Image (tube, coloured by chain):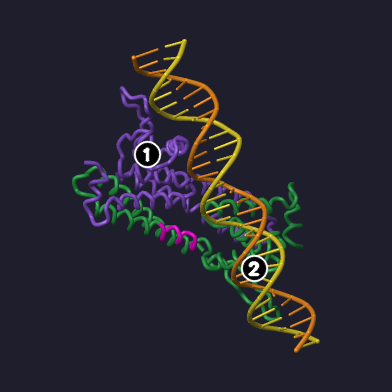
Chain colours: A green, B purple, C yellow, D orange
Amino acid sequence: MNLYTAAMADNNPQSVIETFIERIGLSIEADGLPRIAGRMMGFFVIHGGPVSFAEIAERLQVSRGSVSTNARLLAGLGVIERVSLPGDRQDYYQLCEQPYVRLIEGHIQRQQAMEVLVRDVRKKIPAALKPTRARLNELHGFHKTTVQQLQILVKKLENQS
Amino acid sequence: MNLYTAAMADNNPQSVIETFIERIGLSIEADGLPRIAGRMMGFFVIHGGPVSFAEIAERLQVSRGSVSTNARLLAGLGVIERVSLPGDRQDYYQLCEQPYVRLIEGHIQRQQAMEVLVRDVRKKIPAALKPTRARLNELHGFHKTTVQQLQILVKKLENQS
DNA sequence: CATTTTGTTCAGTCAATATTGAACAAATGC
DNA sequence: GCATTTGTTCAATATTGACTGAACAAAATG
């Protein structure tokens, strides 16, 4: 029994999983990644186990080129990883451990970059412009607190698996 | 003395503020908003006080149409607000209190939507597919914990102002 | 009331990016 | 060595969404 027949068991045929994959795709796209990367992630949440390069292309109805590009993208993010299956020369991919933590870590890095940027600008604003400096302080505090909180989030996620 | 002459006091003339505004723009763009909205935000961090519709257009070198659209977008997010100045029929805008908290609240809502989505899908996956359900549980936990943590972040930000 | 100022809207343009598909290279098996 | 399988690369295409600017409406001014 495969996943599609399984999904067919409920009211809306195989569409439950399909739409799930699609929605994850959109959500990930909103995160700045290509939609196909998002759909692949959704697919891996459902399938998990090693999936062949060819199967990804077929199930998601995308070109081999896209699979290649986006698989490497996701692998670079630490969301999926390549595994080799003995006796098969295709590439296989599977979900990493802690796949979501990696995404958060990306956010942290961007926030940290912003924190530095804001601090640098503040340093260069003349002391006379008090309100501007105050606003920059507030923005700096925002980024700093956000980073701290995201780091706590990462710790919690690491524990809960 | 205006802000540009002030910025000129340091090594790289008025470019410090310009590039700051530009970088904020890019950062906000990565958050899913139009770049002009981001540049406007950067501008308001520097200027804060009521700024006229016309001045925004001029300083940022964008069309009135863009100012109109993006100002309303930011106002909708609760980042800036319209104020009226007696004796002037132009629109003026200024930074809201707690401007950044609002952005986080947007994230929270999206994460909550995802949490619901994942929970719904999980409910429809047959119990026999244990590993799939386990992965959905993990994803659900991810969103749930993220929401909690973001809510704590909001509280902290509210206190620190 | 006519004129000017000001914000909104929307069709059209433009730019950025994702996606494809074909050409290619590397590896495998015969 | 030749044919086949498989992943990569890249130029061409498609798609998406931002941005503009002109037409418009509302309000103020004289």
Residue A64 in percent (x, y) is at 67, 66
Labels in figure, total: 2
Give x and y (percent) for residue C10.
Answer: 58, 33
Secondary element at image label 2: loop
- Give the answer, above or below, for where B40 lies relative to A110: above
Magenta stretch, overall SS: helix
The three-letter amino acid code for the residue at tag 1 is: Glu
What is the magenta range? A101-110
Q: Secondary structure at mark 1?
A: helix
**Residue A49 visible (yes or no):** yes
Q: Chain of mark 2?
A: A
Left or right: residue A57 versus residue B75 is: right
Q: Quadrant of residue C9?
A: top right
Residue B16 x, y percent position in the rendering = 30, 53
Q: Disc 1 or disc 2, which is closer to the eye?
A: 1
Locate the N terminus of chain A by quadrant.
bottom right
Q: Is residue A8 above or below residue B90?
A: below
Left or right of B4 in this view: B70: right
Given residues A103 and C13, the one toward you in this image is: C13
Give me the residue at 62% from left, 67% from top: A68
Q: Amino acid at mark 2?
A: Gly
Q: Does the image show residue B77? A: no
Mark 2 — residue?
Answer: A49
Looking at the picture, tell me which residue is in the foreground, A93 or B156: A93
Q: Residue at x 60, y 72 (%)?
A: A82
The residue to which callout 1 is attached is: B58
> Could you give the CA–CA distance between mark 1 and mark 2, rounded to whole angstroms?
56 Å
